[in-house]
Image (tube, helix red, strand yellow):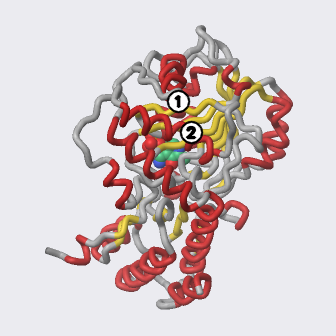
Amino acid sequence: MDLIKSKKLLMHVGPVDIYEEVLYAGLKNNVGFTSDEFVDAFQSSLKRLRYLFQVDQTYQPFIIPGGGTSAMESVTSFLSKGDKVLVVTNGVFGDRWLNIFKKYPVEVDYLRAEPGEYVPIDTIKEKVKEKHYKLLTLTHVETSTGVRHPVKETVEEVRDYVDLITVDGVSSVGAEEVKAKEWNVDIYLTASQKAIGAPPGLGLLVVSENAMKYLKEDNVAGFYLDLRNWLPVMKSMEEGKAAYFSTPPVHTIFMLNEALKLIEDEGIENRVKRHEKVAEAIRAGIEGMGLSIVAKRPEAYSNTVTGVLLKKVKAQDVLTEIVKEGVEIAPGVHPALQGRYVRIGHMGWVTPNDAIITISALERVLKRLGEDIKFGEGVKAAQAILS
Ligand code: PMP
């Protein structure tokens, strides 16, 4: 047995490492979805989502099978034929909205940023003043580049011009400040496998009263992701009564509930601060060893994902070698930077020690591969942030 490889640290952009308590919550036989045990877990998960997204009773939470993409596609439930949509994209996952809406009879325009940047607020404001859009989509943290979009500030500027604002928080919720109600976001969504620290399998949304008015019979959604079909289940479960539309992934919901409980125990503000610190240490480590970060400006840095630009070595070689050092990181997926960068995910139950392990493993690997780095300076810089 290779001890180092078998004791792997997962610093991926999702799924991420899971806390043991969360795993144990899913260690059971199949459980009937009408059982008290399951209804309790569903009910408390729904309530806990309000805390996670910082919303009150005026927001309707949804837990649906799938993941980030199913949550995104379910937003078609709020659109009717011919509606105009503006997609603001800072990379691959912003572009995913375009690919989704192309499948539906809606009109889509987009604004796209260069890799490492986000679309400036003024540009978005000009666009929404030009034309009346029913829906605007933003991506809070663009996972392909690690760029964080200033959601609060953008919404403040554009709120009056669009009917609905949706934010993809798949790589932000549970690690970045998210205040869906205070910021006036209509639909905030995420998935179970990232900063929440549960296994993959669930799409999670909270929906404002304003948005619920648009959940109409003539919406363009398909059958499975039409939130009208899921709404009675959410309402009933929240009242503690079982209901069925399609079989829920019962184990994942038990684990989600435990993860959300642990988030409450930690406190969302503490959790954000922990992520902030770890992210800062990782960035200091990267810059300390003499490499650059994909996100071009500090305002665009995220708490959850750091893209590392390589100078000479191939991304694939770094990925292969770092696993041998007991750390798994993620490939770069932005087509414009393909092969030239790797991504470090730092979300969920990530700790300062994880930052040091990752930076030190990366330094060893890059030295071995012949990259032009200042060996040892990365760990030193990361330590300085953490001590
Ligand atoms: N949006 C963002 C920002 C993501 O990072 C991802 C997943 N990497 C998705 C959407 C899609 O989520 P899923 O893979 O769970 O469908």
Residue 223: percent from the left, percent from the top?
45, 16
Q: Earlier in the sequence, mark 1 or mark 2?
A: 2
Image quarter of residue 211: top right
Taking 323 as reference, is 98 left or right? Answer: right
- Residue contact at pointers 1 and 2, CB within 8 angstroms: yes
- Seen from the viewer's position, the closer of residues 295 and 193 is 193
Vertical side of 249 occupied by 314: above or below: below
- Seen from the viewer's position, the closer of residues 286 and 8 is 8
Vertical side of 339 occupied by 225: above or below: above
Which structural element holds mark 1? helix
Quadrant of the frame with the C terminus: bottom right
Q: Residue at x 59, y 14 (%)?
A: 219
What's the CA distance linking mark 1 and mark 2?
8 Å
Taking 204 as reference, is 128 left or right? Answer: right
Whether residue 243 is visible here, answered yes or no, is yes
The reply to whether the residue tagged 2 has its Cβ within 8 angstroms of ligand 1 is no
Q: Which mark, residue 238?
A: 1
Q: Which mark, residue 84?
A: none
- Seen from the viewer's position, the closer of residues 249 and 32 is 32
Within-10-Å neighbours for mark 2: few <14, some 14–19, many 20+: some
Residue 354: percent from the left, percent from the top?
45, 74
Residue 380: percent from the left, percent from the top?
54, 90
* Amino acid type at mark 1: Glu
Q: Residue at x 13, y 74 (%)?
A: 1
Q: Which residue is mark 2?
A: 47
- Seen from the viewer's position, the closer of residues 190 and 362 is 190
Q: Residue furthest top?
A: 218
Taking 179 as reference, is 373 left or right? Answer: left
* Amino acid type at mark 2: Lys
Residue 334: percent from the left, percent from the top?
51, 52
